């Protein structure tokens, strides 16, 4: 690792030397704890931070240690994770602000939950009416099938098609209603999750 570091030093240090200002003052503390000052980047501190000072003594810039390829890769991974965490926190803060703007209190949140559930219930009610219609169709079909009870092989093709269509419609309608019941659960779960997030936010804004 030491050779990998110092093979890269010449190019990096050369670039730093070329970029060094005539008025720049470089300072660092080496591995033995000795403070070093120079008018150019300090080779003894390539493995640690060094600062470039203005003529007034204020810090113009800080330069980190020269890293090996492995160290640079590890640092890149750490930086990426830190950036992702910052993005997650910022996104959560934006979501919280948006939720507080949308729901000023629990009454507003409860009202929107009720509205969302009412819409789903309206769809389920319409679907249940369709189930009632299918039940009437079932009675009609059973009445017609009664004539062929003794010999089902004589059931006409058109009647068989109607029975098949009825069964397909019944299964589809049952599946649709089941999905709407799941939708009600999803709506309640979403509002429960929001409420759990909102309660401490409301408490915070009330202070």
Image: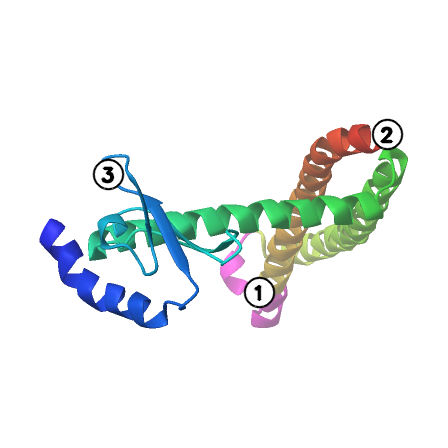
Percent coordinates x, y for residue 110 in the rendering: 85, 37
| Relative side of 35 to 206, left or right | left
Give coordinates of residue 147: x percent, y percent: 64, 56
Residue drawn where x is 30% and y is 51% of the image: 65
Residue drawn 42% across the image and 48% down it: 81
Q: Which of marks 3 and 2 is in front?
A: 3
Name which residue lies at 64% across and 59% down.
Answer: 169
**Residue 19 visible here:** yes
Q: How far apart are marks 1 and 3 (CA)?
A: 92 Å
Read off the residue under disc 3.
Answer: 31
Kindly identify which numbered label has been placed on residue 160. Answer: 1
Circle 2 residues within 10 Å: few <14, some 14–19, many ≥20: few
Where does the C terminus fall, quadrant-wise? top right
| Secondary element type, mark 1 | helix
Residue topped by disc 2 = 206
Q: What is the span of residues highlighted in magenta in the rendered image?
A: 150-162
Say if the magenta span includes residue 156. yes
């Amino acid at each position: 690792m030491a050779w990998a570091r110092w093979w890269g030093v010449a190019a990096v240090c050369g670039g730093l030397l070329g970029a060094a200002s005539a008025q720049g003052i470089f300072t660092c503390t080496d591995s033995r704890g000795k403070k070093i000052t120079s008018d150019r980047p300090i080779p003894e501190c390539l493995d640690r931070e060094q600062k470039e000072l203005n003529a007034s003594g204020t810090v113009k810039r800080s330069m980190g240690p020269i890293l090996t390829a492995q160290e640079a890769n590890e640092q890149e991974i750490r930086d990426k994770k830190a950036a992702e965490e910052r993005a997650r926190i910022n996104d959560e803060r934006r979501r919280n602000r948006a939720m507080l703007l949308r729901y000023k209190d629990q009454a507003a949140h409860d009202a929107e939950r009720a509205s969302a559930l009412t819409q789903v219930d309206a769809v389920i009610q319409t679907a249940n009416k369709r189930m009632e219609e299918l039940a009437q169709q079932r009675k009609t079909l059973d009445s017609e099938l009664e004539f062929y009870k003794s010999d089902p092989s004589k059931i006409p093709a058109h009647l068989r098609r109607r029975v098949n269509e009825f069964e397909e419609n019944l299964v589809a309608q049952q599946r649709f209603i089941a999905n709407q019941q799941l939708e009600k659960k999803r709506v309640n779960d979403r509002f429960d999750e929001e409420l759990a997030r909102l309660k401490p936010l409301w408490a915070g804004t009330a202070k």
